[in-house]
Image (cartoon, helix red, strand yellow):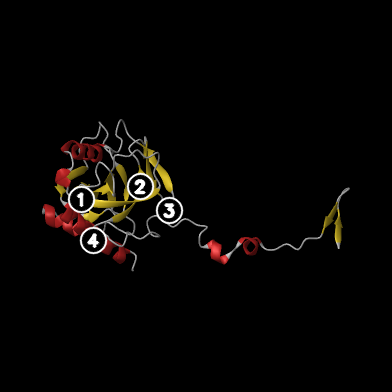
Amino acid sequence: MESQGVGVVFPFVTFVPFCAAFYHPPMNKQLFQAHPWHGVAPGPKTPELVNAYIEIVPTDAVKYELDKSSGHLRVDRPQRFSSMSPTLYGFIPQTFCGREVAELCEQRTGRTGIEGDKDPMDICVLSEKAFAHGSFFLHARPIGGLRMIDGNEADDKIIAVLQSDLAYGEILKIDDVPQGLIDRLKHYFLSYKQLPSDADKRVEIVDVYDREEAMDVITRSLRDYSSEFNL
């Protein structure tokens, strides 16, 4: 059977539904990117060696942040003033800053009423290499962290080194990081949300802690994730 057009003869075609035509079971599993927070494991050697998803690199003049619904990076806001992240910055997958992380913050500071910020655990990764953009995973070895409180929320920043990095890869403890770099990290996090007109500081860094404490914070954030998502 043929369908007549204007000056052209079109053979009759049996149309297959779109989903059936393009669905290939073995291949379909590879068509979609895993969600960086929920779809990628923190790593078999966690907390000693972790997977880290990088959202921001030091040259970014815009703050990118994971869109939790889609798993893609989105623009959060332009970096205010001259504040730019001194290191690679992102998070550890399948972590959550919840009750256990907040309780540790309360224990260490003697404060009450602290809550987790309900985000994945942030991580700053030291490397000598320049990266063009974020949205990639790497292996990082935690060496310490910043105990940061934003309002009444625990917002820890794990400090780590890029595995096998020529300049930083052999560093095992935060005391071996140049103090100037730690000061730059502290300044960035204390100022990147702060406007000159703001009277009161809402962000505090109350402690710089060592590798053992960082291991505890990460382990707690893994348990918080399991509790939050009923795993």
Q: Earlier in the sequence, mark 4 or mark 3?
A: 3
| Residue topped by disc 1 | 143
Q: Earlier in the sequence, mark 2 or mark 3?
A: 2
| Residue topped by disc 2 | 54
Question: Would you say the residues marked 4 and 2 are in contact, meaning their CB atoms lie under 8 Å apart?
Answer: no
Disc 4 crowd, CA 10 A, few/some/many (<14, 14-19, 20+) = some
Distance CA(mark 4)–CA(mark 2): 20 Å
Q: Earlier in the sequence, mark 1 or mark 3?
A: 3
| Residue topped by disc 4 | 219
Q: Mark 1 is on which residue type? A: Ile
Distance CA(mark 4)–CA(mark 3): 23 Å
| Residue topped by disc 3 | 71
Distance CA(mark 2)–CA(mark 1): 17 Å
Q: What kind of element bears circle 4?
A: helix
Please give the count of numbered marks on the rendered protein.
4
Residue found at x 31% / y 35% = 84
Q: Residue furthest left?
A: 110
Q: Mark 3 is on which residue type? A: Gly
Disc 3 crowd, CA 10 A, few/some/many (<14, 14-19, 20+) = some
Residue 147, percent from left and from top: 19, 49
Is residue 97 at least partly visible in the picture?
yes
Residue found at x 31% / y 45% = 89
Disc 1 crowd, CA 10 A, few/some/many (<14, 14-19, 20+) = many
Q: Earlier in the sequence, mark 1 or mark 4?
A: 1
Distance CA(mark 2)–CA(mark 3): 13 Å
Q: Mark 4 is on which residue type? A: Thr
Residue 225, percent from left and from top: 30, 62
Q: Earlier in the sequence, mark 4 or mark 2?
A: 2
* In the foreground, 188 or 33: 33
